[in-house]
Image (cartoon, grey):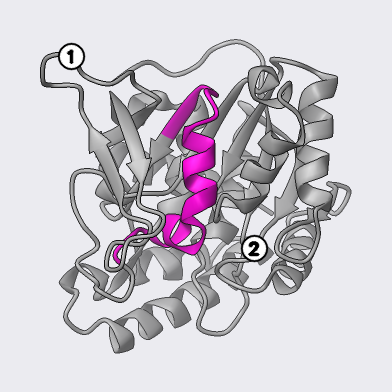
Amino acid sequence: MGEPLTGGPVRIILDTDLAMGAPGSDIDDGFALALALADPGLCVEVVTTVGGNSDVETSTRLTRELLAVLGRDDLPVVQGAPVDRDAAEEIARRVLAEPGELTVVAIGPLTNVAAALAVSADVAPAVREIVVMGGVFLEHTNVAAMPGEYNFWCDPAAAQAVLDSGVPLRLVGLDVTRRVRLSRADARALAQGGEFGRIAAQHTAAWIDFQERVKPGDLLEQGSCALHDPLAVAVVTRPDLVMWLDAHVAVETVGRVARGVAIADLLIWADPPEPNCRIAVAVEADAFRALFLERMAALP
């Protein structure tokens, strides 16, 4: 499984399509931001926003509002694609200024990250690591309208560009993130905490209600919701929470019925391709849940 990281805090750029607070939108990205701020092993340097779960202007506004609730309205927020290139340029600027020091944690479509890598050939070797919530590698979405995992499906060309970049890359996909859940009872417990807990509990209940209405055939989504993005944040300092495999991943960018589908070669035949990432294939769900709830309970 790997071991927890030791040493000083990992300095990160968090790239997100945050939508907690928008009606009918996913809430896991809001929890991911909160978890990144609550993890003593992480230092969030800047938050960049990208269109995905909501339009980028809404994501930017909601991010700033949530940071204010969390007592971190001092943290810079830079708006990105599809409206602005500011986020991509900010990522590239910071990475180039301190080679090897900054990890990018990308929990939305990879548009900003791919654009940042395209700013200069010097960006990719200067990135410490990119950790992505995206893809599904050992399974399938089983949804014809969205065959690829959502973040890859939104911008498959960007996902492929990141995979081609040569950056140290870890991918945390639906194979593991759907297994880490937040229940209605968990939400009620969060509501007994601080202001963030009360707000998050309300949005979580609404999101579970929404999922139950639109996905009546998905038994896993009845009574709970997945913590996709928080798991990707957690593994930056707790890689031991998941099992990692080296892989060569490619993303379908133009397929008629397979947009955004990730094809993972697990390097098991003779003469395999060179690995371009590590993928999460199993998760210690109970250990992650305990860690997540403990850190949420400590928030203001």
**Residue at (67% x, 32% y) in the render:** 12
Q: Amino acid at mark 1?
A: Asp
Relative side of 218 to 241, left or right: left
For this orientation, the residue located farthest to the right is 74
- From this viewpoint, is residue 169 visible? yes
Query: Is residue 297 something one can see in this rendering?
Result: no
Residue 92 is a magenta residue? no
* 268 relative to 131, above or below: above
Q: In the figure, residue 256 lies in which quadrant?
A: bottom left
Q: Is residue 271 left or right of residue 148?
A: left
Residue closer to the observer: 232 or 67:
232
From this view, report whether residue 173 is shown above or below residue 197: above
In this rendering, the answer to whether 273 lies above or below 258 is above
Q: Secondary structure at mark 2?
A: helix
Query: Which corner quadrant of the image does residue 258 belong to?
Result: bottom left
Estimate the x, y position of residue 75 in percent, counting from the top left.
Answer: 83, 46
Tell me the magenta residue range. Answer: 147-170
The residue labelled by disc 2 is 196
Q: Secondary structure at mark 1?
A: loop
Q: Give left or right: position of 20 versus 123.
A: left
Residue farthest left in this picture: 269
Residue 112 x, y percent position in the rendering: 67, 49
Q: Nearer the viewer, residue 112 or 157?
A: 157
The circle on residue 271 is 1
Sooner in the amino-acid sequence: mark 1 or mark 2 = 2
What kind of residue is marked 2? Phe
Q: Residue furthest top?
A: 7
Residue 207 image point, x, y percent: 44, 77
61 displayed left or right of 255: right
Q: CA distance from mark 1 to mark 2?
A: 51 Å
Which residue is rendered at x = 40% and y = 25% of the image? Answer: 276
**Quarter the N terminus occupies:** top left
